[in-house]
Every structure is written in structure tokens, then in C-alpha cells.
Amino acid sequence: MVRAAIIHLPTAGQRQAIRRQLGTLHSNLVKRITQERYAHHFNQFIDYLQTTIGVLPASAPEYDLYLSEFLEVLWDSGEPKTNGTYTVAAVQYFLPQLRKQLPRSWRLKAVWDKLELPSQAVPLTIDSLWGIMGWFAYKSHWHIAFGCALAFNGLLRTGELLNLRVCDCTWTDQGFILTLQNTKGAQRRLLQDESVLITDPLTMTLIVKLTKGGSPGDLLVPVSPQRFRTLWNKMRKDLGLQNDRFIPYSLRRGGATWYFNETGSFSRTMLRGRWQHLKTCKLYISQAQLALSHFSLPSRSQSLLTLYAATLRPHLHLWASQGCVELKSS
């Protein structure tokens, strides 16, 4: 959650005003929505303690014992794995003195992780991307169609894509540099921004189209997250993909797999995806490749994706041919 947000200000009054807008230091430990989730799950655990023993535990080992029992209750009750994860994290958040004092609870949580794999987004293939772009283009949502290509090629998370503004796209001799503000990776590293270099000619041409005629503060994809999800879900329904995990994050997962297959380099893929550790990147790619190997599209969905991709193909050829001219004029 923490990020470099305040530049140097000369007076105490100016610093005070900005800091009060940001809130207390404690409130900036995690995002507000995470705080709300922590509070919900912590209260559930406290209710369990009140029901079972009637008092709060008196020591860290007792907390570990009862928290472990509560995890077993969640497991046996069929609760989602995220409930267990949030509960353990919430106890440490609201009772920081218990940090590193809950060994059994964390071991049980690790066992849960091994026994129940997460439901992850299905990675998009390049052919599926063209079909989805074709659907959005056919519905006259050109900005979203272009945005899908940008998210796929740049390995962008949905929030990163929808936060991009015209001023965040800088043309250089090497390609377009996208400045990503307030990203997940930047928060972990206490950085202000991260960046991605786009060198693919077609994607660069689409960036030119997204930024052309716009003011510096204009969004590249001028839709709200809610509107984006609504249109995405309509696309899934029309293409018969609603029963599978085709979610906006599929763009990043598919893009990472595609980029690795194109380059054959984990290190380059790690840099492009902005992972902090190579091991994390390798695990991410291997899981995505495994998911693709075990997944097949319904025949109706495949036919519709092929149809919409065909309607998009003439535009792709035109944009590709215009690319050099447009980039030079940008």
C-alpha cells in the first residue's frame, strides 16, 4: 500500500494538509478495501472465540491453537480458501504482537494451499485475442478493442490499463514507454511508478490511435472499471465463454505466455511483467502453459471467435501498413 506520494514541501502547514488528505500512517498500511475485509474476517474469528470459550486467549500459543481450530472449521464448512487466508492475515494485522507467533496456523494455511489450487484466469491465446478484439470493434467499442491488444502485449493488469492516460505514453526511438502509476509492484518496492517498453509495430500504432487528439490527462480507454467489466461479461455471454475463467486478467496471463513463447527468455518476460523474482515468473508461466494444455474452447465459441477475428483482419492489415507513417508523424 505504501508509495512515495508526497514531494518536498517547504512549510509544516503544507505538509500537514497533504498528510491529512492521505490519512493516518496506520490507515496506509493496506488498502481500505483490504482493511474492510480484514475487519470482517477478524470479527468472525472473535465471534467464534466468544461462542466456544467465551473469552479472548491470554497468550500467543493459545491464539495459535484456537486460530488453527477455526481454520479447520472453515475447511470443514466448505468456505472459500480466501476466507482462511484473510483470517490469518487479519489476526496479525489487528494483533501485530502475534506476528511470527502463529506457526501452526500458517502451516495449516500452507497445507490448504497445496490441497486446493486457486481458480485462475484462463490465459488468452493470440487467436482468441483477435476474436475478442473483433467483437469489441464490431460493437463499436474501438477503445476497448485497442486496449485489449495493449494489455496483452504490455502484460498489463486491468487497473493499470484503465488508469493509463495520454501523458503516460512517451514515444522514443526505441518504442513507446508506458508509465504505470500506483501499480502492485511499485507498492511492494516503495516506488512511485513502473514502466513498460512497447516495441511491437501494430501495438504502437494502436497507441497512436488511442492518444491521437487527446489531452494529456485523458484516459486511453475512457470507461470506468465497472463499465469495462459489464462489457467484458456481455462479450463472454455472446461468445459462449461465461462458463470458463475468461476474465480481464486473462489478457495479462495470455500475454505473458505469448511473450515467453516468442522470446524464449524468462528474464525478459520477468522484466516485461515486472515480477520481482525470476522464480515467481517461471511459476507463473509454467502454470499458464499447463492451463492452456488442458483447456479447449467450445466449438461454438471457437467459430464465433474465428468469425469476429476475420472481421477485424482487414483493419489489422491496414493499421500495420500505416504504422510507420503514423509513428513518424506522432
Image (cartoon, rainbow, N blue to C red):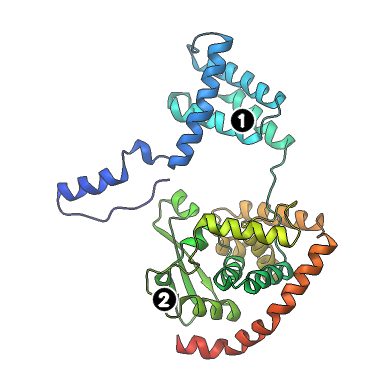
**Residue under numbered circle 1:** 84
Q: How many marks?
A: 2
What residue do we see at 68% from left, 52% from top? 121
Q: Quadrant of the C terminus?
A: bottom left
Label 2: how many Cα within 10 Å (few below 14, some 14–19, many 20+): some
What residue do we see at 65% from left, 55% from top? 247
**Residue under numbered circle 2:** 214
Residue 118, position in %: x, y? Answer: 69, 43
What residue do we see at 65% from left, 82% from top? 316
Q: Is residue 100 visible?
A: no
Residue 87, position in %: x, y? Answer: 56, 29
Above or below residue 229? Residue 59 is above
Pick the front one: 200 or 40? 40
The kind of secondary structure element at disc 1 is helix
Q: Is residue 282 visible?
A: yes
| 1 vs 2, front mark | 2
Above or below residue 315? Residue 237 is above
Residue 126, position in %: x, y? Answer: 71, 69
Pick the front one: 55 or 59? 55
Label 1: how many Cα within 10 Å (few below 14, some 14–19, many 20+): many
Q: Earlier in the sequence, mark 1 or mark 2?
A: 1
Q: Are marks 1 and 2 in contact (CB under 8 Å)?
A: no
Q: What residue occupies the far right of the structure in this picture?
A: 299
Residue 14, numbered circle: none
Identify the image quadrant of residue 74.
top right
Looking at the picture, which amino acid does disc 1 mark? Answer: Gly
Report the side of 187 relative to 257 (left or right): left
Looking at the picture, which amino acid does disc 2 mark? Answer: Gly
Residue 324, position in %: x, y? Answer: 55, 89
Above or below residue 14? Residue 148 is below
The kind of secondary structure element at disc 2 is loop
How far apart, in angstroms, are the residues tagged by discs 1 and 2? Answer: 46 Å
